[in-house]
Image (cartoon, rainbow, N blue to C red):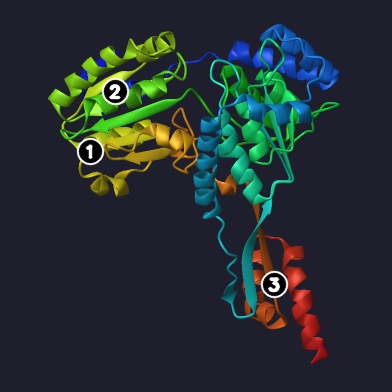
Amino acid sequence: MQISKHPEKNTWSELIKRPIIKREKITEIVAEIFNNVKENGDQALIDFNKKFDRAEVKNINVSLEEIENAESLISDELKSAIQRAKENITKFHASQNIEIEKIETTKGVICWRENRAIEKIGIYIPGGTAPLFSTVLMLAIPAKLAGCKEIILCTPPDKNGNINPAILYTAKLCGVTKIFKTGGSQAIAAMTFGTESVPCVYKIFGPGNQFVVAAKEYAQNFGVSIDMPAGPSEVLVIADEKAVPAFCSADLLSQAEHGSDSQVIFISTDVKIFNETIKEIEKQVIELPRNEYVQESLKNSYFILLETIDEAIEFSNLYAPEHLILAVEDFENSISKIQNAGSVFLGNYSCESAGDYASGTNHTLPTNGFAKNYSGVSLDSFVKKITFQHLSKEGLQNLGKTIEIMAEAEGLFAHKNAVSIRLNQDNERI
């Protein structure tokens, strides 16, 4: 870990840098995989399963029997936990569905906006060292609420050609339409072009390694939309003298264990809390099963001592973290000052893990500084917004002259005529 005490503001630009991933070679590999999948369809996916996941899979479709059997392979305790998380996530995302409001902008001119679900969406779920069944909840629930007709899920098989049963159980619970045994950038390619088995989709969601991230970006060249640009997971914790070092350390480590390229930032205004948190990190990290990932992640991470909470918020806004934890007593005073963050956790008991699993908010969030211009996944991510307008005869008479003047000033006389012909016809009838 890198320690910086009271850094000058002109050095902050160095402290907010993320670990650099060289993309040139990755993009080249992704392009080759896309071409292979486009040309060879299912067979390419079967071959890639063997090459990358060492899995012999004859059929990439997950059968109904496999889905039904999954329920018996996970504990009742886990099923209950998934159910409760589903209820909270559903409740929060359902509240985002607002009623249509028609606005009369000028007398006789009515405008409004309506949601239409994106008909076909794809979900990518990592299935390697951390099979993220929680991400199935975060993506399939709002997709179902939005009314998406097809929800396609791709996830890599294990060496025996099986999918993690918790992923299958959760997918069935949340209304996923079809599930396929394919991972990596080849899964993104399959959902982009379609194969004999995998339908092409209009928008792709979900996290993944650097190849999946690059593949999602590459897919946009073929008319497919994605949820957001992404990078490795990250958290920024701000702590005052009332923070609990053990809690802060646990939150930092919970993000560091995502992968060796993850980054965590700790900022404190109190020297005692600062030093105790570093000691706690060293103590807790030893006990973690994913210790090697954490140790590598900590090499890319910063522990910073600053003077005030306002200064810490200023740094955070510049960094634009995926997750921001305010382990401060008077967090209410800081809320309005937060400009750039994916999701914010307030107070000593609001651990980031709550948002990752079951509080109700979505854990699919912008990383790598994209919180400056992107939101996390919400119900809106699964819909298009279409505007409507209705002009009565009176409405066009009231607004027509304005349109004619503007169209003529732009030299677009056909635009002007579309108004004039209507107004003149009405005058002739009189």
Residue 404 picture location, percent across and down: 67, 71
Q: Is residue 341 visible?
A: no
Q: Under tag 2, what secondary structure?
A: helix
Give the Cα separation between the discs numbered 3 and 1: 51 Å
Amino acid of disc 3: His
Amino acid of disc 2: Ser
Residue 318 picture location, percent across and down: 35, 33
Asked which quadrant contains residue 32, the reply is top right
Residue visible at 29% across and 37% down? 326
Mark 2 burial class by Cα count in 10 Å: few <14, some 14-19, many 20+ = many
Residue 125 picture location, percent across and down: 62, 27
Amino acid of disc 1: Val
The answer to whether residue 210 is left or right of residue 296 is right
Front position in the image: 415 or 125: 125
Q: Under tag 3, what secondary structure?
A: strand
Residue visible at 60% across and 70% down? 102
Asked which quadrant contains residue 115, the reply is bottom right
Q: Which mark is residue 249?
A: 2
Q: Earlier in the sequence, mark 2 or mark 3?
A: 2
Q: Under tag 1, what secondary structure?
A: loop
Front position in the image: 269 or 62: 62
Front position in the image: 394 or 297: 297
Front: mark 3 or 1: 1
Residue for badge 1:
328
Mark 1 burial class by Cα count in 10 Å: few <14, some 14-19, many 20+ = many
Give the Cα separation between the discs numbered 2 and 3: 57 Å
Residue 414 picture location, percent across and down: 77, 64
Residue for badge 3:
390
Q: Earlier in the sequence, mark 2 or mark 1?
A: 2
Mark 3 burial class by Cα count in 10 Å: few <14, some 14-19, many 20+ = few
